[in-house]
């Protein structure tokens, strides 16, 4: 009954619906100069629509007063169908006491055919005028519009029975906020779960000092005062950054002038909030691990070198000697960035620069970086005389910057919950080093990831867009409440001998790890092969491994013929007589204790893992394939981009400290015109001595790139050479190996980039079909070192 009542109350209500079917403009009126005519030609649905002609500026058109329909703090959906030449936008103008503000809610770049403009809008400001209208980006071309709707979707009450996140963690728990998050239900959710807030945008330079000496604090004051009034810690973000900083700051700036501007800015902004804001992100994103000195080439750096960082911390410390002063950056969970940041912070601390805190933004995704890399980062900084904070945590549901979902699958949202758990396991373990953890936003209804790096649906936070707790919340607060994780694994094609021995086929990949062992799968026409290694020192005839494929179980008892003892346990091998199934469950029973281990996941069949050999030998690295290389070579048969194009035949050799590769590329037209090295004609070589087949690079993974002229990018080979040939070119190079041994298996791939003029038109590899070799080692092939 209550549920029914709630769902009736929560149903969306249509506040305005303009279909123009009654032959009138239904309240739409000209904005500026324009002629509005209800005609049949302008109909999208039904038999009339609104034609807008005679416009005199891009902002003129048809407008509707929506002030009577909208209330501050509430969320609305708007939609309209438009057609016209050139980009059209659905825009909104609001005013308070005569001061206007404009916002484009949705834009269609090319509405030559009927196009729907859709937006969700939360009114967060006091207004005495509110109007929606359709305008052009430029020009005054006629347009037609029809079927406008304004609907209100009430947000359900927040879940007051939930445990507050802040009460379950041993550090301050923060959220980044804007105005919307301190109003209404969002304000309730914020104060219930968090004891710290960070201003999301309102203390950035473009907000606080848009013109020299002209300070505007209204927006920040409101957020800071809300935090203070609710007994929260307030973090100020941020004093020196290369982004969201007005152009005037760097205009005609000598070093002296720029440092003076910085000092004045910090004194004014920080000074205003002494006693209210206790932590400041003093510098933001100043590290660039691809520079030899690890420092970002921002105007700050170009003009002042390291001095802007020194000045920022000195002045901040003078203004408030008790404040935490943070050196903040993103991607610190990646080894190269981590090391670059460590070096710079250490140098500055050694000089006496008053950095008190290292901030890790931690904008991560559901896969990368693993929690262990986050742990490595926290441990790395532990020996410096600073504390640490997580300053901008969110977990994107995407692992790349191009995909997007219409609606996010529930299993991804569950996976995200487990990901939050893994991350908070690490953060709790290192609570002694962490003074606060902040998530970048309150709920999925308002996240910067809905427009960065592209516009797409994203859901990176602990609460959903209805402000209700997600699995992510449970992952932080009570992981026992998480639905089981459906993991992902791949089964390459392969037919190992089923005899309880671990043949080379199995050695090509690391086992999928289990708390008490590990396993792998292969597929072939005959069925699915399984190898499971189990640590279980107490031999019992009821010990068993049960593999279920789409719900059908196969039991392998420890007493079976294809089970062999290994130190501390046993190894079970089996051929499951099933065609490929999707959902795989592995259950291991330790009969002596009754303990069960379960792995549940979706398995994808993939092509066999390529295996090639490198013989022992030390060639001269000169771009010539001398006799020592032998006659055998390997192709690049896997098409990653394009349908035809350059390919290579390659071979590898090894000796005490190096791996050698020679690749003869067939490519008649060579170009180095592209701006990016990977878009030029070039060969990439991928080496992972540990062969750990991981979703992201670790310390021993490297990507080398050698263009047809011998230009290098990426990691540095020990030696390299390139030579043109009648049919293309040859590259040859030597790469460092740490104590290689005969029989070792190395993760390896080779990629040929084929350029046409200034763009890349084809890519071929030896093994990896994903196009992700540059950041993901899991689909590389395997190279075996032989004598
Ligand atoms: C983002 C804000 O959340 C957005 O609203 C704004 O449009 C762009 O900036 N790292 C930072 C933050 O340090 O300041 C950024 O915030 C997100 C990335």
Image (spheres, grey):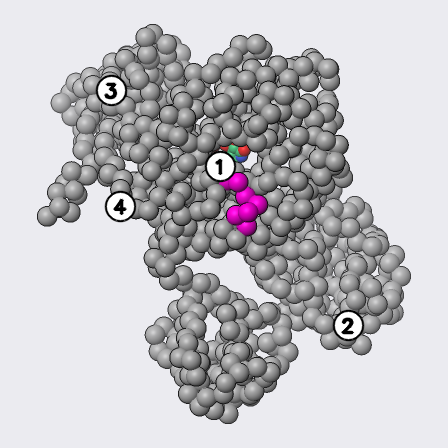
Q: Is mark 3 within 8 Å of ligand 1?
A: no
When asked about the image quadrant of residue 185, the answer is: top left
Residue where numbered disc 1 is placed: 452
Mark with earlier residue (3, 1): 3
**Percent coordinates x, y for residue 479 in the rendering:** 39, 56
Q: In this picture, is 264 found above or below 681?
A: above
Q: x, y (%) of residue 559?
A: 47, 91
Mark 3–mark 1 distance (CA, rounded to whole Å): 30 Å
Q: Which is in the foreground here, disc 4 or disc 3?
A: 4
Q: Residues within 10 Å of mark 1 (few under 14, many from 20)?
A: few
571 sits to left or right of 33: right
**Which of pointers 2 and 3 indicates the residue nearer the eye?**
2
Query: CA gap, disc 1 to disc 4?
Result: 33 Å
Measured as percent of width and height from the top left, residue 268 is found at 56, 15
N-term-proximal mark, 2 vs 3: 3
Label located before the other in sequence (1 or 4): 4
Decide which of 775, 637 is in the foreground and name it.
Answer: 775
Marking on residue 373: none
Nearer-the-camera pick, 621 or 633: 621
Q: Which of label 1 and label 4 is nearer to you?
A: 4
Q: Residues within 10 Å of mark 4 (few under 14, many from 20)?
A: few
Disc with the residue nearer the chain's start (4 vs 3): 3
SS of the residue under disc 4: loop
Task: Identify residue for label 3.
Answer: 66
Could you tell me if residue 334 is visible in this image? no
Q: Which residues are magenta?
A: 430-436
Q: Is the CB of the residue bearing disc 1 within 8 angstroms of ligand 1?
A: yes
Going by the image, does 82 lie left or right of 695?
left
Identify the secondary structure beneath mark 1.
Answer: loop
Residue beneath label 2, please?
A: 741
């Amino acid at each position: 009954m209550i549920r029914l009542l709630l769902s009736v109350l929560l149903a969306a209500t249509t506040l305005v619906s303009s279909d123009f079917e009654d032959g009138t403009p239904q309240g739409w009126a000209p904005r500026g100069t324009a002629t509005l005519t209800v005609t049949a030609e302008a109909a999208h649905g039904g038999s009339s629509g609104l034609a807008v002609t005679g416009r005199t500026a891009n902002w003129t058109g048809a407008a509707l007063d929506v002030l009577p329909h909208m209330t501050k703090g509430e969320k609305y959906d708007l939609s309209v169908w438009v057609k016209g030449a050139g980009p059209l936008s659905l825009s909104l103008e609001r005013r308070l006491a005569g001061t206007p503000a404009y916002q484009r809610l949705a834009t269609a770049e090319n509405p030559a055919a009927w196009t729907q403009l859709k937006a969700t809008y939360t009114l967060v400001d006091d207004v005495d005028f509110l109007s929606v209208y359709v305008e052009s980006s430029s020009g005054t071309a006629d347009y037609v519009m029809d079927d406008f709707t304004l609907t209100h979707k009430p947000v359900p009450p927040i879940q007051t029975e939930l445990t507050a996140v802040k009460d379950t963690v041993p550090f301050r728990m923060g959220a980044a906020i804007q105005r919307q998050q301190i109003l209404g239900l969002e304000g309730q959710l914020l104060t219930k779960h968090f004891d710290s807030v960070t201003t999301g945008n309102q203390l950035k330079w473009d907000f606080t000092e848009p013109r020299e000496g002209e300070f505007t604090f209204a927006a920040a004051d409101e957020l800071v005062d809300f935090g203070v009034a609710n007994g929260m810690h307030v973090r100020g973000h941020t004093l020196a950054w290369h982004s969201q900083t007005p152009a005037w700051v760097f205009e005609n700036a000598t070093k002296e002038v720029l440092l003076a501007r910085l000092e004045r800015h910090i004194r004014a902004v920080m000074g205003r909030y002494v006693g209210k804001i206790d932590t400041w992100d003093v510098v933001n994103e100043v590290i660039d691990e691809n520079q030899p000195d690890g420092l970002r080439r921002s105007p700050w750096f170009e003009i002042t070198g390291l001095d802007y960082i020194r000045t920022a911390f000195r002045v901040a410390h003078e203004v408030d000697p008790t404040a935490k002063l943070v050196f903040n950056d993103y991607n610190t969970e990646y080894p190269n960035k981590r090391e670059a940041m460590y070096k710079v912070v250490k140098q500055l601390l050694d000089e006496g620069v008053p950095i008190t805190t290292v901030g890790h933004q931690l904008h991560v995704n559901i896969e990368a970086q693993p929690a262990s890399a986050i742990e490595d980062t926290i441990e790395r900084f532990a020996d410096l005389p600073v504390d640490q904070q997580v300053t901008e945590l969110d977990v994107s549901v995407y692992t790349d910057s191009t995909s997007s979902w219409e609606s996010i699958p529930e299993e991804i949202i569950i996976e995200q919950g487990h990901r939050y758990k893994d991350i908070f396991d690490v953060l709790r373990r290192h609570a002694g080093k962490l003074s606060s953890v902040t998530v970048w936003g309150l709920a999925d209804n308002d996240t910067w990831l809905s427009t960065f790096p592209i516009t797409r649906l994203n859901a990176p936070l602990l609460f959903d867009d209805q402000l209700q707790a997600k699995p992510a919340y449970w992952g932080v607060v009570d992981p026992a409440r998480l639905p089981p994780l459906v993991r992902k694994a791949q089964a390459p094609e392969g037919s190992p001998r089923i005899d309880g021995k671990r043949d080379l086929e199995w050695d090509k990949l690391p086992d999928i790890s289990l708390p008490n062992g590990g396993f792998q799968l292969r597929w072939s026409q005959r069925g699915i092969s399984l190898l499971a290694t189990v640590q279980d020192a107490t031999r019992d005839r009821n010990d068993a491994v049960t593999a279920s494929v789409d719900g059908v179980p196969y039991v392998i008892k420890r007493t079976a013929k294809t089970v062999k003892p290994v130190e501390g346990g046993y190894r079970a091998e089996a051929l499951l007589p099933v065609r490929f199934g999707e959902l795989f469950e592995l259950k291991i029973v330790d009969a002596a204790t009754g303990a069960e281990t379960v792995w549940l996941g979706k398995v994808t069949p993939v092509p066999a893992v390529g295996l090639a050999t490198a013989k022992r030998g030390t060639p001269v690295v000169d771009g010539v394939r001398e006799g020592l290389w032998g006659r055998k070579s390997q192709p690049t048969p896997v098409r990653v981009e394009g349908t035809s194009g350059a390919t290579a035949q390659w071979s590898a050799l090894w000796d005490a400290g190096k791996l050698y590769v020679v690749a003869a590329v067939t490519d008649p037209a060579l170009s180095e015109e592209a701006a990016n090295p990977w878009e030029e004609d070039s060969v990439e070589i991928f080496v992972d001595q540990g062969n750990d087949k991981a979703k992201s690079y670790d310390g021993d993974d490297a990507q080398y790139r050698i263009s047809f002229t011998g230009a290098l990018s990426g990691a540095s080979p020990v030696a390299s050479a390139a030579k043109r040939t009648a049919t293309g070119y040859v590259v040859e190079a030597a790469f460092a190996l740490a104590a290689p041994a005969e029989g070792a298996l190395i993760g390896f791939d080779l990629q040929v980039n084929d350029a046409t003029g200034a763009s890349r038109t084809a890519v071929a590899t030896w093994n990896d079909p994903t196009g992700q070799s540059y950041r993901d080692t899991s689909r590389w092939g395997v190279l075996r070192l032989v004598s």
